[in-house]
Image (cartoon, rainbow, N blue to C red):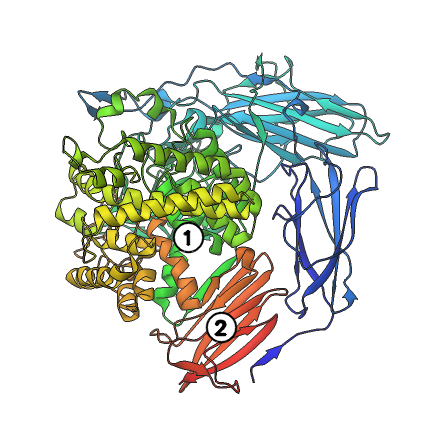
Amino acid sequence: MITSALEGRHVRISEVLVENLHGPRGIWTATPRYSWVLDAGSGTGQSAYQLEVVDARRGATQWTSGEVVSDQSVLVTHGGDPLVSNGEYLVRVRVRAGGVWSEWAQAAFATALLRREDWVAPFVVPVQVPISADGPSRVDGDWAPPVHDGPPESRLRPAKYLRHSFHLASTPVRARLFATAHGVYAAEVNGVPVSDETLAPGYESYDRLLSVQAYDLSGRVHGGQNTLGIVLGDGWYGGRIDFTGTSAQYGDTLSAGWQLCVEYTDGTNEIVVPGTGVVSTDAGPIRYSDLFIGERYDARHALAGWSTPHFDDTSWTTVAIAEAPEHLVPFIGEPVRPIQELSVQEVITTPSGDTVLDFGQVIAGRVRISVTGPRGAVVTLEHSEVLDAHGEFFMNIAGFNKDQTDVYVMAGDPRGETWKPLFAFHGFRFVRVSGLTDASRPEQFRAVVVASDLRASGDLQTSDPAITRLHQNAVWSQRANFLAIPTDCPQRERVGWTGDLQVFAPSAVRNMHSLNFLRRWLRNVRADQDADGLVPVIVPVPPFMHSLSAELADDPLLSIKAAAGWGDAITLVPWTLYQRYGDRQILAENYDAMAAWVDRQARVAASGLPARLHHKDLDPQTRSRQRYLWNSEASFGDWNAPSVKAEDASLEHLLDAARTTGEVIAPLFHLRSTELLAKASRVLGMTGDADRYESHAERIRDAFAGEYLDTQGNLLVETQGTYVLALAFDAVPEHQQAHAMRRLVELVHAAGDHLDTGFLSVPYLLDVLWDGGERELARTILWQRSAPGWLYAVDRGATTIWEEWAAIAPDGTVGHASFNHYAFGCVDDWLYRRIGGLQCTAPGYRRFRVEPDLDAPLAWAEAHEDTPQGRAAVRWERLDETVELTVTVPGGVAADVRLSAGWSAANRSDGAEAFTLGPGTHRVLAHRA
């Protein structure tokens, strides 16, 4: 029989979450959902629960669920009166399992300002020179670089320092600060930072929404005089952003707003808001800060004690007062923070004599320096992800205003000086240091990793260091690019390409608790969606793209508005989140946007034809089929397919290839989105919508087969990617699937058993081969050591996922590419499922499949995921002629074990290849049947 271990008889709750967060201080809803996880050793499933919510201010029970007979432990909706803004609460829960009630477990949380009318403060506008619009321009249909008359300090502006001194009648028992800005800000109270958060409020669709952050200042303000200090930088609002590097896209004037809500011991409340007594200066040490260019800090201008009550601010200037924006909303999810520090692995002297620091890992972040030197000495830090073939410092990104350079001017303090940028971050591994007489001591420097503070939720390890490193590279790329929004890269563009995110999302949700981070981004997607349902290819949409809409009409790249596989993020990402977390609300929040996108696809399909059919006399059958095929709009197609770039890497050629594959790929994504919308409709109980979209999906499928497949099953456009997507989305009739699979295999062999798939098809390649019986070929592609292939970069020392398969050529030539681009890291999802053996099969991981590839060229592999129900884990290891499989199943969950073909369970009396396991830790011995 299979052995199992149920450690302990009494159930224990290991964690309590509010909206999937630990102790959030600014929850964004009046009816939050509560979740709890049973300790892994509890052994038995929950049969009942009891919830209580206590108003911490009044000490009174706000709601009690009573004893509820249910095994639900995830996202239990608050059932009492709606919570109030700026409330303090305690949620308590206990469960019954095996007839025994657990001890109570609890978590404290607080609510944000839940209604717009709860914000009563104005915005303050410091005196400032407006930000100049600095970026490329269009000249005769081409891009011309900006004209710069001098170094950054001559054209960028200093950060703004604001002081708000206020008096409190007595020391409050509670104090909470709510703040936001047009720009990025950092707040201090009485000389101490209010939080370790950075780059607040983050990157958003500022014209349509602006998030408000919440900070607990209880115990940090007191009766008498207090001072709140705010530093304002350009950030995403006014600084240089997107692939153009253009500034002042959302506005040319920075401002900030805040209100301090205090409660005194007698129960009275006061709201402190800024007014004309707020003063500001730009004479502080941050002489400029820009996300792309970098930051210059002159320590000679340091304002010692500037955010304390006794600082002399008589030379500062009174601010202007403005109305707060109407579109203020509570912040959702996890803030950006410094999350890790790395030490220098090597101090390199390059052949040309430069001093370069190697931190051993490509990251997004900043460098902290601890140095000593004469007053006025200038230390310059230049950041890059790679050295060139000769070991020289190499700026691997190209574009306008992409300096990635920080500058520190010393005050001359003999005790030493420590500094790191406040409002800049860079993508880098290597840092060229100049201006220090001795930069050889590695302890002078630390790399500070900056990211949205998502909790880790999964990991994968194997006996093959290259496969393990591939997984780790995907995690590091996710960490660097999940920074305020999901970006494509943390150095060159730093924008939210929707296509990049949708292909990586299934991997992202395994590695990190991504639900609220992506919920916040999806709020921006909905905000930026056009009235006709169009979802932009980048979210937030850089206003530069709107302001030049007429001029961009002739741009072959930027004129693409409704790209297949990019706009479909609005259906694919919510469905991925629902599957992983079981959160129906994520579907409800996005349902209208999903439907608007799919309906738009259908309208365009009904009224348009692809370019190749223009001016042709079409027979009625063709015309009828074309009405269901979304194929007439410009698209990126299967972007970045290797053979296309190998043939001709020019943008014109890439776009020609995109148009060629795009006509076939676009209707496939319309099919996929329509089917997912139908599924979402069923989940939400909208049966009429579900029936309608299911019927429409079948019409798309039939039309696709009639227009793009010949009688044998050959596609009109034959690439690996087109076959992969047609098979993955079940668009090939059953009687033609075997032939289509043979053609795909022939194309793979013709490429030397290498992948030749682009952004959109690569996530599905290995699964299509695997499910089509070509498992050895799938393994060959995964373990391929030459380019294009995943392990090529690993073998060349990659510590993140590269944008280009051969960003470093076999001869060592280094290309101008991003070395931190997670899109091709989408294989990580496959590694979890096929190598680790963990596959979620019911929403929220209420059921999962255990099906590792026991024939993979590995001695062992292990994977785990912290699911909403608790930790699910699989480890398999070869023991002579058998394999030992260890499976951990959380309480209330079932695991369906499927051994690889030709294997059976040696320690089961029936020798089965497939069986189901309940909660606990189980050990299975498998041998070849």
Mark 2 or 1, nearer chain start:
1
* Dot 2 and dot 1 residues touching (CB under 8 Å): no
Q: Amino acid at mark 2?
A: Val
Q: Amino acid at mark 1?
A: Trp
Q: Nearer the viewer, residue 924 or 489?
A: 924
The answer to whether residue 155 is left or right of residue 814 is: right
Location of the N terminus (image quadrant): bottom right
Residue picked out by circle 2? 897
Q: Residue 646: image x %, image y %?
A: 15, 49
Examine the rendering and report whether any part of residue 572 can be seen.
Answer: no
Residue picked out by circle 1? 476
Secondary structure beneath label 2: strand
Seen as rendered, the residue at the extreme right is: 266
Q: Residue 477: image x %, image y %?
A: 39, 50
Q: Residue 819: image x %, image y %?
A: 31, 48
Location of the C terminus (image quadrant): bottom left
Q: Residue 422: image x %, image y %?
A: 49, 34
Q: Is residue 691 above or below residue 926?
A: above
Q: CA distance from mark 2 to mark 1?
A: 31 Å
The answer to whether residue 26 is left or right of residue 790 is: right
**Looking at the image, is mark 2 or mark 1 nearer the viewer?**
2
Q: Residue at x 61, y 14 (%)?
A: 314
Secondary structure beneath label 1: helix
Q: Is residue 133 above or below residue 242?
A: above
